[in-house]
Amino acid sequence: MSAAATAADKAGGRNMGAAFKDAGISALVALGLFGAMLGLKTEATPTGVVLVPRPDLLAYAVAAVFLGRLLRLSIPARPGGYVANRALAEGLSRAGRYVAPALLAFAVVLPLVVGRYGIDLGILVLTYIMLGWGLNIVVGLAGLLDLGYVAFYAVGAYSYALLAQTFGLGFWTCLPMAGILAALWGVLLGFPVLRLRGDYLAIVTLAFGEIIRVVLLNSVSITGGPNGISGIPRPTLFGLQFSATGGPGTFSGFFGLEYSPTHRVAFLYYVILGLALLTNWVTLRLRRVALGRAWEALREDEVACRSLGINVTVTKLTAFAMGAGFGGLAGAFFATRAAFISPESFTFFESAIVLAIVVLGGLGSQLGVALAAVVMIGGLELFRDLQDYRLLIFGSAMVLTMVLRPRGLVSGRTPSVALGVRREISAELVAEGRG
């Protein structure tokens, strides 16, 4: 055996030993983190609450972390970091031309081929798609990291509920008002954070979301406090109500149909589908005008953006306002669909879910956000019977996705303006928005 081969074997042995050491440390950290969360479970007994150990589950989790870390270290890193892959980006762009119309056609006919449960799940997925597209304006296009997006969702929901119950206004009258009020709150958030970037911006927006929730929780005379607001009016179809009475002013009575609760659910499905498509259409149109190009310039380099004479203040405020406005529209729909809202519906976990949808889908990608919402929200329903492990599976899937696709499911970008032929830009050539 030559000296070079011997040296290579020794280097490989050292690398393998370092990998096992690193994986062992990761397993010990997992043991410390999961020891109480997974290793112990509380159960109610006639004598009180007792702790039941679950060593088998804890052992599985620690072993999974050890093997996963070892597998990750065994994959050789590519030299020089990411390598631009224009062919892959253009291939994904061509595939998107067929995937997007197929998804739209499937969404239109979904209430005709599934039952009540399928329609309810479709409403939930479309709501998060709309929220994701709204947040994508702020995070994906403008590059402003927002962790308090649920605040605008809550403002829209409570605005509709209070306007409808106080002034007796209908859903279609209150809907644009809820979006406008949420946009105004977006501007109010934008002013204090104009000079903040990165982690500081994320902390302030997170605090803003919590402030809104605490205010809603303590304003008992206005918002009902922890009891929330119930009896929120339902939307109507040109004045026709979806009522079981079947009178002349109802949907079933006007069309001579037998009343079915599915009619109202299907109508709500098409309402949120229309709102989501409106959000997508407005976003795509804005990307082609000067405002959308200013958002993308701000995301790439704020200093260069200022040097080009772009008003950074107006650019940031419009991004917050547009994203918040669409969040307010989604909140108004949530209020009318559930007919009851409370501060517990607008926690930080909702903001985290929407932000995860945007990041996993691909910052700035409309199709990627839709696919991520379908996978995350619809995929979680597959594990509804595994209540104890849903979040564990969800977190593991997110980690795996970010390891395999760190720039998101659809990471390529099409330039808004191009000289000659518009060619897809690989995500490796585009900066990640960090605010």
Image (cartoon, helix red, strand yellow):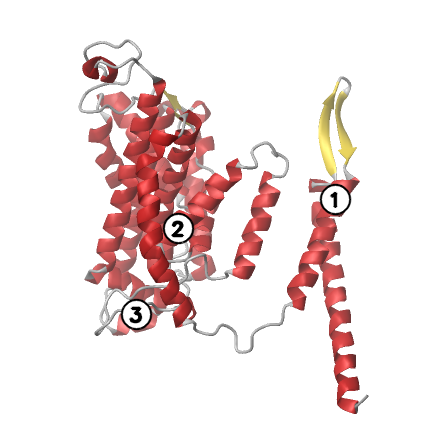
> Which mark, by number, is residue 194?
none
Secondary element at tag 1: helix
Q: CA distance from mark 1 to mark 2?
A: 34 Å
Does 339 sit above or below residue 209? above
Q: Are marks 3 and 2 in contact (CB under 8 Å)?
A: no
> Which mark, by number, is residue 58?
1
Residue 69 visible in the snapshot: yes
Q: Earlier in the sequence, mark 3 or mark 2?
A: 2
* Quadrant occupied by the N terminus: bottom right
- Mark 2 — residue? 369
Q: CA distance from mark 3 to mark 2?
A: 21 Å
Q: Are marks 1 and 3 in contact (CB under 8 Å)?
A: no
Badge 2: residue crowd in 10 Å (few <14, some 14–19, many ≥20): many
Q: Earlier in the sequence, mark 1 or mark 2?
A: 1
- The amino acid marked with disc number 2 is Val
- The amino acid marked with disc number 1 is Leu
Q: Is residue 113 left or right of residue 271?
A: right
- Mark 3 — residue? 423
Q: Position of residue 341 (x, y in %)?
A: 40, 27
Secondary element at tag 3: loop
- The amino acid marked with disc number 3 is Arg
Badge 3: residue crowd in 10 Å (few <14, some 14–19, many ≥20): some
Q: Earlier in the sequence, mark 1 or mark 3?
A: 1
Residue at (54% x, 60% y) in the render: 404
Q: Nearer the viewer, mark 3 or mark 2?
A: 3
Q: CA distance from mark 1 to mark 3?
A: 49 Å
Residue at (33% x, 30% y) in the render: 112
Secondary element at tag 2: helix
Does 373 sit above or below residue 191? above
Q: Position of residue 172 (x, y in %)?
A: 21, 30
